[in-house]
């Protein structure tokens, strides 16, 4: 039995650490956390900006992170004490957590540093989204990304490497747009400062963007995507929307838009594992520049302060928690 401190989320603004005893089941690994990271959806839940139908696991909390195997369940094969693993399970805001085998974790590939590997959950999901969105592109296409958070920044890089002639990134926060530019976006637009539809008309000669990835998590973002995409263009939806909203679907029908959903982890479990491994292949090759996306590092003991600060700082893209 291993005793650890783990984050307990009891509702908006109510987050604290409490003790938890862990013992790996037959198909589980006990993992000492190297690093966890704060997901945008966790921030939304902490703020209380979430509808009641979403039942989030609250204790132990957190779903992004990784670490080193310290104990192996009796029926587990293919893992050993000392292996480096990335979590696709729950409970990562903790000193130790349990990872399910085979679908709740993947081994960290040789040659990938742990600080990057521990971002495996958000990273591989965003890489996969860029791969899916890129499949709808042709030579000379203009792509756009709505939302320059962690996922949007990764997707923007993927669309550029996937062949977009131009990538346009849209966000309300100038610092995030500056970062997107630094990481390869050709054009950035802040709709608070300029008219988005007009700017897109100028850039595309009135045609609209060929492919747009929605990664803002807001209804406003999805409606913006629907507005700027061209006739017969593609909207690739990445966001995990946490409450219902109104969408103007007039153009979806009228312009016969191609709507694709890019959620890697909600495909079949087997398909998700293949997707994760493939995304890690690209990360290992250095196709994506990830380190500039990490803003701050907090200790687990400061998790409440971490959430307060991360929510108040609109410029933050991804921050990490180290036990
Ligand atoms: Zn996440």
Image: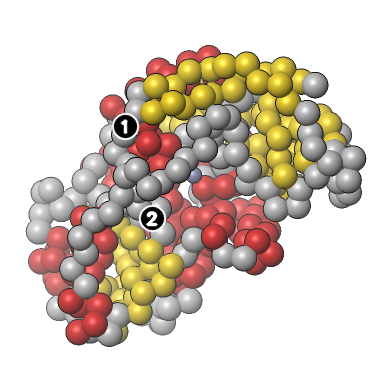
Considering only vertical position in the picture, is 79 above or below 229? above
Applied colour scheme: secondary structure
Considering only vertical position in the picture, is 282 above or below 176? below
In the image, residue 75 lies at what x, y percent? Answer: 88, 45
Q: Is residue 257 left or right of residue 151?
A: left
The residue at the point 25 percent across, 77 percent down is 252
Q: Nearer the viewer, residue 228 or 251?
A: 251
- Marks 1 and 2 sit apart, C-alpha to C-alpha, by 17 Å
- Please indicate, yes or no, whether residue 225 appears anywhere in the rendered image: yes
Q: What is the tally of numbered marks visible in this picture?
A: 2
- Please indicate, yes or no, whether residue 117 appears anywhere in the rendered image: no
In the image, residue 305 lies at what x, y percent? Answer: 40, 18
Considering only vertical position in the picture, is 190 above or below 30? below
Considering only vertical position in the picture, is 200 above or below 295? below
Q: Nearer the viewer, residue 300 or 320?
A: 300
Is disc 1 surrounded by few (<14), some (14 to 19) or many (20+) residues within 10 Å?
some
Is disc 2 surrounded by few (<14), some (14 to 19) or many (20+) residues within 10 Å?
many
Label 1 vs label 2, nearer the camera: 1
The residue at the point 69 percent across, 64 percent down is 270
Q: Quadrant of the N terminus?
A: top right
Residue at the disc numbered 1: 47
Q: Is residue 260 left or right of residue 229?
A: right
Disc marking residue 39: none
Residue at the disc numbered 2: 239
């Amino acid at each position: 039995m291993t005793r650890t401190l783990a984050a307990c989320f009891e509702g908006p603004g109510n987050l604290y650490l409490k003790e938890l005893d862990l013992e790996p089941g037959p198909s589980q690994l006990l993992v000492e956390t190297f690093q966890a990271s704060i997901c945008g959806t966790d921030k939304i839940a902490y703020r209380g900006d979430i509808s009641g139908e979403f039942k989030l696991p609250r204790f132990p909390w957190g779903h992004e992170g990784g670490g080193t195997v310290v104990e192996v369940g009796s029926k587990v094969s293919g893992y050993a004490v000392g292996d480096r693993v990335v979590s696709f399970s729950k409970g990562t805001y903790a000193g130790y957590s349990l990872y399910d085998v085979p679908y709740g974790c993947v081994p960290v590939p040789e040659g990938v540093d742990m600080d990057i590997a521990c971002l495996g959950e958000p990273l591989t999901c965003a890489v996969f989204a860029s791969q899916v969105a890129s499949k709808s592109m042709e030579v000379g296409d203009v792509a756009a990304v709505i939302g320059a958070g962690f996922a949007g920044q990764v997707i923007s890089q993927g669309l550029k490497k996937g062949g977009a002639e131009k990538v346009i990134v849209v966000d309300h926060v100038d610092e995030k747009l500056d970062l997107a530019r630094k990481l390869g976006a050709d054009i950035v637009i802040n709709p608070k400062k300029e008219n988005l539809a007009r700017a897109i008309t100028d850039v595309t000669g009135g045609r609209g963007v060929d492919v747009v990835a929605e990664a803002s998590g807001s209804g406003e973002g999805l409606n913006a995507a629907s507005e700027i995409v061209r006739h017969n263009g593609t909207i690739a939806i990445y966001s995990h929307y946490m409450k219902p909203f109104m969408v103007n679907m007039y153009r979806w029908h009228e312009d016969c838009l191609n709507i694709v959903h890019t959620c890697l982890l909600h495909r079949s479990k087997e398909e998700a594992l293949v997707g994760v491994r493939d995304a890690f292949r690209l990360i290992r090759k250095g196709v994506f520049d990830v380190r500039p996306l990490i803003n701050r590092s907090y200790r687990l003991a400061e998790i409440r302060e971490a959430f307060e600060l991360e929510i108040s700082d609109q410029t933050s893209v991804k921050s990490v928690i180290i036990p």
